[in-house]
Every structure is written in C-alpha cells, then in structure tokens.
Amino acid sequence: MTDLLTTEEYKAIAAGLDLSGNAFIDGAFRPAASRKTIPTVNPATGETLAQLAACDATDVDLAVARAKDAFDDGRWRKLAPAGRKETLLRLARLMERNLHELAVLESLDSGKPVGECATVDVPDTIHTIRWHAELIDKIYDSTAPVTTNALALVIREPIGVVGLVLPWNFPLLMLAWKIGPALAAGCSVVVKPAEQTSLSTLRVAELAVEAGVPAGVFNVVTGTGKDAGEPLGLHMDVDMVSFTGSTATGRRFLRYAADSNLKRVVLECGGKNPAVVLEDAEDLDLVASHVVNGAFWNMGENCSATSRLIVQASVRDALLDRIVAHTREWRMGDPLDPANRVGALVSKDHYEKVTSYLEGARVAVGGGTEGGIFVEPTVLDGVTPEDRVFREEIFGPVLAVTTFETLAEAVVLANDTPYGLAASVYTGSLRNAIRLSREIRAGVVTVNCFGEGDVTTPFGGYKESGFGGRDKSIFAHDQYTEMKTIWIDVSDRPDEFVG
C-alpha cells in the first residue's frame, strides 16, 4: 500500500513540476510543426498548466514515419523477448520511483483526487506494465496436428504500427492497458492522449526512453481529436488503432478504417451499467458501500460506473437509507488534499452536461454543486426506463434508482440499454447469481461486489460498448499480433507430399 503524503507535500511537488506540453516523437520532445498550441487546464482551479503542441496531420505523418522506421528495422520487435521484458520492467521501476510525481500530474490535469491517483491509478498502471512485461517470454507459439510429411507452425508476429487513442478519465491506466500488450508484442506505437489530460502520458514516454525503449518505438502526438486523432485513424501506415472513449467517436474510427487501409480497430466505448440487488442479498450495508463506490469512484467518470441501481421493491427502502448514509461520507474538495474522495469534473463543458441531468429530478441525496466544476455525489430516486437518466450515459457522480418485482423484470431492465459493458448482481443465492450473470448481456459481471476483475481478466463490452477485442489479460496480446501459418514440406520425395 502506498503511503500518502500531506496536502502541503503534494502542493510542493506540483509547484516544482517542469510542465512541457511538446509532442514526443522519435525519442525527443518537439513542438508542433505549425508551432500552434492549445492550453491544458487544471479543472479544479481554472489555471493553465501548460501549452500543448497542437499537432496536426503533418506531426502525425512524422510520428508514424518514425514508428514505421523503428518497426521495419527491428530495433524493438527483433529484440529477444527477454530484452523487451527487462526494458519494460525498468520502465515500471522508474515509474515507481516517480510515483508521487505521476500522481500529482494526473490529479492536476484531470481533477482526480490525488489520494486515488497515488494509491490506485499509478500503482495499477505500474502493475499492468510489469504484468505484461513478465508475459513476454511466457507466451508459446504452437504446431498443428498435420501429416508426418509436413510440419505446420502457428506463430504470432507483431501487427506493426499501432495508434493508441486514450480517454481523459483514466489517462495513465488506459495508457498502460494499451502500451503493455502492444510493446510486449513488439509493435511501435503512436499515442494520442485526450487533449484535456496529456501530461502524464508525455512523462511516461520520457521515462520509457530512459528505461531503454528505442527512439521511434513510443511516440506521443498531442492535440484535438479532429486535428490529430482523425489523421491517425486515416493513416495508411497505421496497422491498427485501439481506442477507448465515447461510442460516437468509436464509430468514427470504424469509418476511418473503412476509408483507409482496413486497419484493425479495437473499441472500448460507453456503458450504462446496472447493479441488480435481489431481496435475498445478505448484507445490505455492504451492498450499499459497493453500489456507492461503483457510482461515485472517479466522480462517476468511469465507463464501468454503476449508474443504474435496479433493486427489488421489498428491500428498496432499507437499501436506499444505507446508500444515502454512505454517500454522505464521500468528501468533496481540493483534489490535492488526500482526504478528499471527490474532485473536480474534467471541464466546464462536462460539468454543464452532468448537471443538466439533475434538473427536475427527484434527489434523494446530493445534487449540490460548487465552483462551477464540482458536483456532489447524487442519488436520484423513482427513475423509470423512460427517463433520460436511465437511458443515457451521464459520466458523472449520479446514481439512478429503479425498482422491480420479479427476476424476469430485473433482467429486462438490466438489458434495456444499447450498451453492455459491465454489471453487478447482489444476491445470497448461488442459483440466482449464476442465472443473472448469464442472462445480463455485459462483458464483465461481478457478483456481490463492484469491480472490473484485475489485470489477468479481459475487459470490454457487448453491443455498443465494445468492438474487436479486449483490454487486459493474456487475450489483449492477441489483438496486437498477426497469426501466421508456416507449412514446411518434410517428405522424402516431392510426389509424397500431402498438402
């Protein structure tokens, strides 16, 4: 467990940061070719932290060209698996040494509470990189059961140049979910972080070169989705794009692939995730703590957040009382105060979107706002399937409560969404737990807890929540590789060969 510093110590780290917003291409920081910049702002204070390079197609072309050079000459992909492994382990160790600096960067840029950054986000990021590094020399290729006149090898090869497009809600962790398997496979990457939260990604790129990742293998282009993300998606020398973000933007990347080189696309998109609580749940206070954590962790800016509570009518009152009590324990305020659990939303635009869902709603607890950027954890009661808050992804600290009578009704309500990312089931019955886990259409279903599994378990969704693959686990490595069959004739005479 990471020991937290004091607010004053975190503020001292913040004051001492050298915040460069230049892009990182071919092992060095450089401004955009146009010399244009855009500000990145601390959402909690409105202060401009740095001027980011406003990259466009020219900068993307350069980054992709350098990544392709690095891939083609094999400076990374041809390195022995043990060599790539040790390099990524060195990166993990460097990040560990700079843990509190990375936590402060993440907090300043995104508004996230520094306590969560230091105890969850950054340690999980380091663990993810270390886990994928350790897997490099433990994934075996195979042979096929063929005639004795031939030897058939089935091998994986790195796919090539990969565009990694990140969201703003978990900048470091989503970076690790993607660079971990991509670099482990031997690919070169061009990372496009969200323009709101680019600083921690740039710092990791710098540490990667210090760890020994060759120049050109790990590049970062900063800027807007239109100016930098779209050229990356359309680039003919990008072999794959892995994207995490909104479903609307995910659709664009599928179009970019169709309009360019049919590059592989992996999407992890939105969610409207149910927590289904049956009347036989054994400990309603524990259930309430999990539901509240699922709804309000990271200010609800989480694609797998528990945004819908679907509770059996007979236990609704007792559970809601406990949820209200737990919600009041979530202290909101300065993100650099490690005692606070709720920080600022990422931007004023996002604040206005989230608060629009509170207008005219029946608020059981919360609903308060502060400073035009902070929103209290809020529980909305009496929500029906026709309501906006039931159907639309809010991406803020808002929990909608809906009741049901029968298990069949619970399944219908849980699946009444175009999304299918995550769900939770709370019950004391093993039979009901298994039935509901199978019938709810979601990529991750937790029982009697909120969570996403760990680095060993795949993460991704059904329906409009996902496409093309999964993050995390050994399965994530497959999407960054091509599968090749090598058929070798070992017959004594050519006319004996059986193909």
Image (cartoon, grey):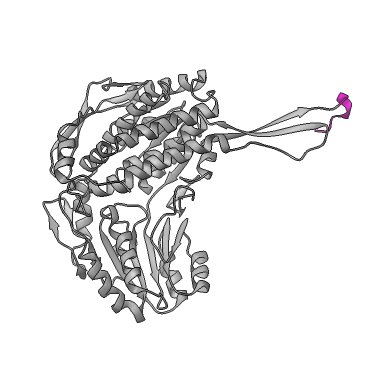
* Residue 15 place in picture, x, y as percent: 14, 34
Task: Count numbered badges in the picture.
Answer: 0
**Is residue 496 inside the magenta stretch?**
yes
Q: Nearer the viewer, residue 296 or 494?
A: 296
Residue 243 shows in this picture:
no
Q: Is residue 51 left or right of residue 233?
A: left
Residue at (40% x, 79% y) in the render: 405
Q: Residue at x 32, y 77 (%)?
A: 316
Query: Where in the figure is residue 209, as x and y percent of width and height?
Result: 37, 24
Q: Residue 478 or 266: which is nearer the viewer?
A: 478
Secondary structure mainly formed by the magenta segment:
loop
Quarter occupied by residue 378: bottom left
Hey, which residue is sitting farthest bottom in the picture? 314
Give the image location of residue 30, x and y in percent.
Answer: 28, 20
Q: Is residue 204 located in the magenta-colored stretch of the structure?
A: no
Which quadrant of the figure contains the C terminus? top right
Residue at 34% across / 64% down in the picture?
Answer: 290
The region drawn magenta spans 492-499
Give the image location of residue 417, x and y in percent. 40, 61
Going 42% across and 29% down the picture, which residue do you hit?
189
State whether residue 15 appears in this view: yes
Q: Is residue 487 left or right of residue 120?
A: right
Front-lying residue, 385 or 423:
423
